[in-house]
């Protein structure tokens, strides 16, 4: 079962990474950006790129059984 959660985490991380790099106008990403831009300002896309990378790493570690 942890493999399914690991794959889900990796997919979410990829979504955040790709949308952050492309500064996407996808509705879910726009909603996330509107909420977090109050705190991060102009660096909100960099925040989502970094968060996406960290979530991908956590998903990989979960998939190989570290967590």
Image: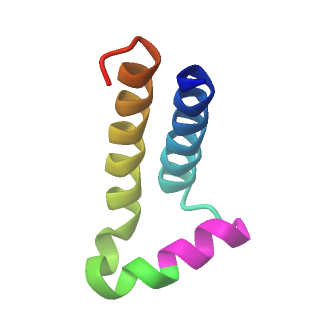
**Does residue 50 appear to the left or right of 52 in the view shown?**
left
Q: Which quadrant of the view contains residue 36?
A: bottom left
Percent coordinates x, y for residue 46 in the rendering? 33, 57
Q: Nearer the viewer, residue 67 or 12?
A: 67
Span highlighted in magenta in the image: 25-33
**Does residue 19 appear to the left or right of 48 in the view shown?**
right
Percent coordinates x, y for residue 44 in the rendering? 36, 69
Percent coordinates x, y for residue 39 in the rendering? 28, 82
Q: Tell me what residue is drawn at x 40 percent, y 57 percent.
A: 48
Q: Is residue 28 magenta?
A: yes
Q: Which quadrant of the view contains residue 53?
A: top left
**From what the image shows, is residue 24 above or below residue 52?**
below
Q: Tell me what residue is drawn at x 71 percent, y 72 percent.
A: 27
Percent coordinates x, y for residue 59 in the rendering? 44, 29
Q: Nearer the viewer, residue 55 or 4?
A: 4
Q: Nearer the viewer, residue 38 or 21?
A: 38
Q: Main secondary structure of the magenta part?
A: helix
Q: Tell me what residue is drawn at x 32 percent, y 39 percent.
A: 54
The quadrant of the rendering that contains the C terminus is: top left
């Amino acid at each position: 079962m942890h493999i399914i959660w690991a794959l889900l985490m990796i997919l979410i991380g990829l979504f955040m990474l790709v949308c952050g790099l492309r500064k996407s106008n996808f509705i879910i990403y726009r909603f996330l950006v509107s909420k977090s831009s109050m705190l991060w300002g102009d660096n909100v896309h960099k925040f989502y790129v970094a968060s996406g990378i960290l979530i991908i790493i956590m998903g990989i570690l979960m998939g190989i059984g570290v967590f």
